[in-house]
Amino acid sequence: MSGPTQKVLKPGDTIGILGGGQLGRMLALAAARLGLRCHVFSPDPDSPAFDVVQNATCAEYADVEALEMFAADVDVITYEFENVPASAALVLAARKPVLPDYKILETTQDRLGEKDFVTKLGIGTAGYADVTSAQTLNAAIAKLGLPAVLKTRRFGYDGKGQAMLREGDDVEAAWQRLETRAAILEAFVPFEREVSVITARGADGQVVCYDVTDNEHRDHILKVSRAPAAVSEAIAEEARRIATRIADALGYVGVLGVEMFVVPDGNGARVLVNEIAPRVHNSGHWTLDGASVSQFEQHIRAIAGWPLAQPLRHGTVTMTNLIGHDVDDYAQWLTVPGATVHLYGKRTALPGRKMGHVTVVEPAAKP
């Protein structure tokens, strides 16, 4: 049974957001500037997105009655994280448009399914193999070699649910620590840099890509993004082409992030896809202050059925995540020229927890 078709929203209409983290918070703020209201659904009573909306539902995703009441109060539904339970998505999609289409989650929630999808498009990825036991893990290592990265197929982010395997490691112990029977082994990629492309696609098929962004991770968590990336125009064009191909193939509506590796290839370089994020993405936070339209507004425009904007970058932009107790030093950024501080309102600073970010814009030199 197909669900409701997309409608064009008007100011005063309500967007439902599944998930109450910082991405939901920034989506709601972008919607408010466009005269649209938001209703946030999250099981966490301390959700930072609750602070910026009038309507919120705090309930579990398995609470069908709460989901139905939520759907009745909104005009369209989106999500700020991709691990929405399929059962909840089905309940909602039968009642209101869910964008991006919840069926896309079936592809992107499973790392193996995502790799297969990308490969079938003729787009390069790291070598990979399905792993279901210690025996199949050893077979995968024999095929791909070491070092390699062992990852759970589902519910992994910011380095969770994965382990680097090197020569001499206890493979059996690594498998047991992962506590899963559904995993994927990915060959290690000797990349020059990690980049991403934030891409918006409207219901009419229009696709708009932001500048390719350089990403620097620490302890598997994004720490710094820089736009534009220090890559050739040929590589930037290839990265945008790949992101556009993926968005079109998914029939996507909204903003997605495509993480990629730039790897040496003879005298040049090529691009391999690492992961797809079917939502606004941390590496696109620079657009809040560094572009004429942010990734969050672009997502709202897409799901509202409004025209997408052509973003203009204001200069060279650096986004720095405030992770854990980094946030304690937020005041030092307040006097930095060109800096804008974004704090997410989370009560407790924990190791590895994203508490805020800072963007620094250096305007382009005038000719």
Image (cartoon, rainbow, N blue to C red):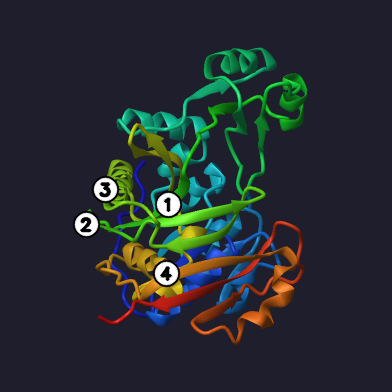
Question: Which one is in front in this view, the residue at disc 2 or the one at disc 1?
Answer: 1
**Residue 327 position in % (x across, y down):** 70, 72
What x and y, as percent, mark residue 165? Answer: 66, 28
Spatial distance from mark 4 to mark 1, Cα to Cα?
A: 13 Å
State the mark number for residue 234.
3
Closer to viewer: mark 4 or mark 3: 3
Which circle marks residue 196 in the picture?
1
* Residue positioned 30% across, 30% down in the render: 122
Of the residues shown, which amino acid type is indicated by label 2? Answer: Asp
Q: Are marks 4 and 1 in contact (CB under 8 Å)?
A: no
Q: Secondary structure at mark 4?
A: helix
Q: Quadrant of residue 336?
A: bottom right
What SS does tag 3 mark? helix
N-terminal of the pair, mark 4 or mark 1, is 1
The disc at residue 204 is 2
Looking at this rendering, what residue extends furthest in the front direction? 267
Residue type (three-letter) at the residue carrying disc 4 = Thr
